[in-house]
Structure formats: structure tokens, C-alpha cells
Amino acid sequence: DGGITQSPKYLFRKEGQNVTLSCEQNLNHDAMYWYRQDPGQGLRLIYYSQIVNDFQKGDIAEGYSVSREKKESFPLTVTSAQKNPTAFYLCASSNDRDPTNTGELFFGEGSRLTVL
Amino acid sequence: AQSVAQPEDQVNVAEGNPLTVKCTYSVSGNPYLFWYVQYPNRGLQFLLKYITGDNLVKGSYGFEAEFNKSQTSFHLKKPSALVSDSALYFCAVRYNFNKFYFGSGTKLNVKP
């Protein structure tokens, strides 16, 4: 079945450590996204990528980094510079070959990061 | 600026009763509007979208949404709520080619 796989599901980190969250998709989508979700807030865009080897900052990119070396993969690194990293992180993709540009986002199951 | 508002943090409804989850939007140009549902510790699942055409859009699990251009609203509805509908619901708008803006979410509680 086609879909988006995020790993790990749960991750614990000590302060000062970098961690990398994995996101893999087999939907053949060009565009991929990372969102952060905090209680009582909507999803906030961290980074997005429209094509391999290219990505753009979203609304809350500080303290995060990404890479897009392969179409299927869009890993997110939460660096020690991120002051409040405890959150639920969601990866998504969309089919931007749709000429109407009206396609929906497809989401992974999320990764919950807790800083100890 | 593009924005989406969900004015209710929580909606309570009895099983079997109709439900409405409200959403209003502010966009320039044609609005592309979406509803998603999220169960605890899970990703978001797509329910339905409005692109153009009929103002009443039908989606998954018996949900539908009514687009009202004059009121800039896109309320989610279901004629008869189920306990299993209890979840967090997000309204979203697509803009700038491939960016999405999400509302803050509404928690739906359906009581037996």
C-alpha cells in the first residue's frame, strides 16, 4: 500500500542533543512537508520541499534542518538550537503534478519527541 | 493574509444527533478548503475538500461540508453522530500553489 512512513513513533532526547526524524513516502509525490503540532494549536509549517535537492523554510524553521537527497525521503533534524522541541511532528506529501494544484495533503502517523 | 478560524475549541453532541463543526476562512482568490480528522497520537486523515462547483461537498464516513461564499464559511456536518466520530477536526486552506494553513482544531465529543 502506498503511504508515508515516519519513524520513530516516540523519541526521547536529552537537552543539547540533535535528533533526526525519518520520513519516507512511496506515493511518487514531488512535494513533502514537515509540520509541528502543539496542544491547542494548529499545525505549523517547519520546512517544505517541492523537488529533490531543494527546500524552503516554513513559518518556524529556526532550530531545524532538512535534506532532500531522494524523492522518497525528507528527514528532519531537530537541533540543540531549538529551544522548545517537545512536540508532535508530522510529515506530509502532496501530488503537485496535479495541474489544478488542488490536491490534498497525505500525512504520516507522526513522531512524538520529548526532551528530558 | 490567508487564515482559517475554528471558533470552537470543543463541540459536544449526543450520539444520533446532527453535528456541526465550524470553520471560517480568509483568502485572496479562489479558496481551496479541506477538512481533516485526527485521532489521538495519529496523523491527519483527509475527509473532504471544496475546490469549485456544488456548495455541498460529501466526504468520507458520512461527513459533508457546506461552502458559503458570502459568509466565508466551510462548516463540517454529519446528520447523525457516532461515538467513534469523537476526534480532533482541522479545517485547512491551500494557497500559494502548495502551502496549507490550518485552523487550531476543534475537539468533537460524541456521548452515548
Image (cartoon, rainbow, N blue to C red):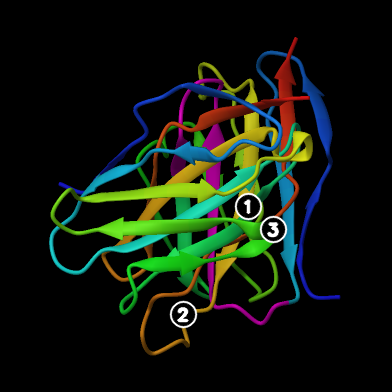
Label 1 or label 2, whichever comes before in sequence order: 1
Give the percent coordinates (x, y) of residue B36.
56, 51
Q: Which residues are magenta?
A: A27-45
* Residue A33 on the magenta segment: yes
> Could you tell me which secondary element the residue under label 2 belongs to?
loop
Give the percent coordinates (x, y) of residue B51.
35, 73
Q: Which mark is residue A91?
A: 1
Compare residues B77 and B50 and report the one nearer the observer. B77
Which residue is found at the position 43% from the left and 31% from the top?
B104
State which quarter of the image contains the C terminus of chain B. top right
Do marks 2 and 3 share a subunit? no
Say few, some or many: other residues with alpha carbon within 10 Å of mark 1 (under 14 / 14 to 19 / 20 or more): many
Q: Looking at this view, name the residue that lies furthest to the top.
A: A116
Residue at image mark 2: A96
Q: Amino acid at mark 3?
A: Tyr
Choose top left, top right, bottom left or bottom right for residue A72: bottom right
Give the percent coordinates (x, y) of residue A64.
52, 38
Q: Is residue A73 above or below residue A76?
A: below
Q: Is residue A24 left or right of residue B67?
A: right
